[in-house]
Image (cartoon, rainbow, N blue to C red):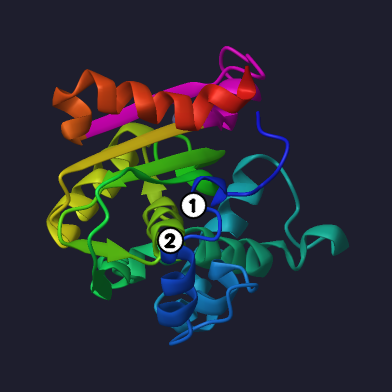
Amino acid sequence: MTPSGNAQSKMEGSLADEIDGEIDGEMDGDNAPVHESHANKVAGKVDHARIERAVREILLAVGENPDREGLRETPARVARMYAEMFGGLHLDPRRHLKKFFTERYDEVVLVRDISFQSMCEHHMLPFLGKAHVAYLPGPRIVGLSKLARVVEEVARRPQVQERMTEQIANLLVEELKVKGVAVIIEAEHTCMTIRGVRKPGALCITSSMKGHFRTGSSTRAELMTLIYGHRQ
Ligand SMILES: [Zn+2]
């Protein structure tokens, strides 16, 4: 994988970077992880007491004693964790794309290596990896960090990787009137690595290509070079 977490490396010192700084100022500091800045907002919408009761039941069901010292705080801890992991359910990622700039830029915009953590809805186990989000602008461009926020919020809910990929692509198509969108997600699923077939290191790769990325083989080839070229 990539040596650095430089998600904006293809737009160095670019127009979009400047714009991003401008329009991002309206809400949260960019150095704060997204989930922390939203934690308070969503905390009230998750029924912690209900999760705590359920976790206690699970502990009893597997033959544990939920009242022993080490487990006493566990249900409450798990409730806070789920509130964070599923916090995206109470947020509309679309709002990040409502603030856009009208700008002429006819080339590919790519934010590469957006790390994310999600929860497989089949096993309630995490899957985590990187998303690459690219678009070919129409009349609108959006702050680069907004793309990362969209990934983050789409990820923080019970998910399957295929749907997550499609959802991110559709949001960009709908809100930005783009000429093309490409979303590629690479993730490791702990439901495959710690249980079941137990294949650590296996990566699941999904992609959603729309517009010019679907129809134009040269646009698609350029994208692949931007994403994977540096790894060779
Ligand atoms: Zn799973």
Q: Secondary structure at mark 1?
A: helix
Write the residue at 34% across / 70% down. 91
Q: Which residue is mark 2?
A: 144
Query: Label 2 is placed on what type of residue?
Result: Leu
- Whether residue 212 appears in magenta in the rendering, the answer is no
Circle 1/circle 2 CB separation < 8 Å: yes
| Dot 1 crowding, Cα within 10 Å, few <14, some 14–19, many 20+ | some
Residue bearing mark 1: 11
In the image, the segment drawn in magenta is: 187-209
Q: Position of residue 51 (x, y in %)?
A: 51, 64
Residue 53 appears anywhere in the view? no
Report the residue that reaches farthest toward the bottom: 26
Q: Tell me the CA gap for discs 1 and 2.
A: 9 Å
Toward which corner of the image does residue 205 lie, by quadrant? top left
Q: Cβ(mark 1) to ligand 1 < 8 Å?
A: no
Residue 162 visible in this rendered orientation of the protein: yes
Q: Residue at x 15, y 45 (%)?
A: 179
Q: Residue at x 23, y 31 (%)?
A: 209
- The residue lying toward the viewer, choosing from 192 and 129, is 129
Q: Callout 2: 10 Å neighbours few (<14), some, many (20+)?
A: many
